[in-house]
Amino acid sequence: MSTSSAPSRILRVGQVVTRLAAHIQSGDEFKDLWIEGEVVQARSSPVGHVYFTLRDNVGQLQCVLFAMKAAQIALTPRDGNKVLAHGYIELYTKDGRCQLQVDDLRPAGAGDAYLRLEALKRRLTAEGLFAVERKRPLPPAPRRIGIVTSPIGAVWHDIQQIIARRDARMELIFAPAQVQGVGAVESLIAALDGLAQIRDLDVVILARGGGAAEDLAPFNDEALVRALARFPRPVCSGVGHETDVTLADLAADVRAPTPSAAAELVVPDSSASQQRANRAWRRVAGRVRERIEERRRRLETARRMIDRRAPAMRLAVRRQRIDDARRVLDRAIARAVPLRRQRAVSAQRRLAALSPLAVLGRGYAIVEGANGHIRASVATLEAGERVRIRMRDGRAGAVVETLERNG
């Protein structure tokens, strides 16, 4: 090639990086990735975004976990951790940098177990074991409750205390079981099978405290799920913490976020008014959860579409607006609650002022006939009639001697 000849085609830098970005975003190759590597250079921004780099012995990749997602993920990236990150690749034209935008994060080595669990979940879902139609409601007034949990630890003690406080008349039938480790699945199934033989059993609580994913593994076992599906009475599960959702939770008729919450769901408060309040609260909470889940799904779908199509700066602006709106809503709620409480106290005071007992406290009395009916007029009394005088601190018997009418 002659050194004097000019290049036939010259591209600007912006043209090249723009074409690269368009190529990455146009296909599916970089949109749904699970990437395993070691975390280095992890740091958090003041607003909660987490920036880090994934590396192995071949290369490295910069990553970002935005604050909204970071709040939903239990695992926080730390230098030296080996993790499995899910997300999609973006190329920023301003600095020519490729970055993995992370929306899920798991410990390394959990990938295969996670995929096996998801495959089992899909298969059991297809069989209808988790279908809403087969779930039974909790009995409104149970009397005999089976409890399946470990005989050691705080869960069994907490359940007993909560149920005794809510309704001491409840009969508890304890079926102790091993809840983790080798043999736990067989122990749990044996406890359920034993309770299935008991007559007049109203409901069963399956409970376990929080723990690591491997500790909760028995509650993701297919054999236990099928045992729950065939159990002849309603089952309420309370396994782990609120964020832990096992296949046993999905197979149970009702899932509670914790063992203590399961006891509260199964046993209504002995007060009639409290029972009505609890039922109303569960209905409202269920509808709110459904609406929240629906909105969350729609928001997640919209977010993914925006993330794939909009520039990063526009995304950051929208996230900031959402954070501002959340803070405004929190402040509004904080102002509204004391105001509503003050109104309730004022109404209670006005109601107390109108009570007949308050009038008695100022020195007045109420005259009642022998039949207990209030006599408000002299015309309703007869001389010699025995009456009772109701005063502030009690009643006194009396006999009408004379009658004097006004006017």
Image: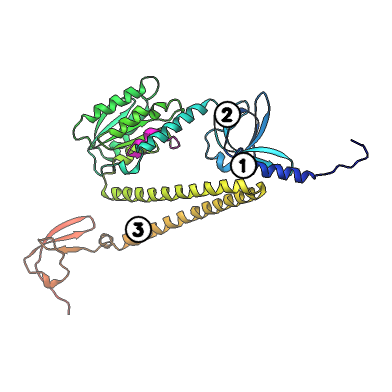
**Left or right position of 302 against 292:** right
Residue 267 falls in image quadrant: top left
Task: Identify the mark nearer the N-term, 2 or 3.
Answer: 2
| Residue designated by label 3 | 348
Left or right: 324, with 403 as reference point: right
For the residue pair 100 and 200, the one nearer the viewer reads as: 100
Q: Residue 157: percent from the left, percent from the top? A: 33, 29
Residue 19 drawn above or below residue 334 = above
Q: Is residue 280 magenta?
A: no
Disc on the earlier residue, 1 or 2: 1
Marks 1 and 2 sit apart, C-alpha to C-alpha, by 26 Å
Q: Which numbered disc covers residue 83?
A: 2
Q: Amino acid at mark 2?
A: Val
Q: CA distance from mark 1 to mark 3?
A: 65 Å
What residue did someone put label 1 on?
27
Name the residue at 16% across, 61% down. Answer: 389
The reply to whether the magenta stretch includes residue 250 is: yes
Q: Which quadrant of the structure image shows residue 240? A: top left
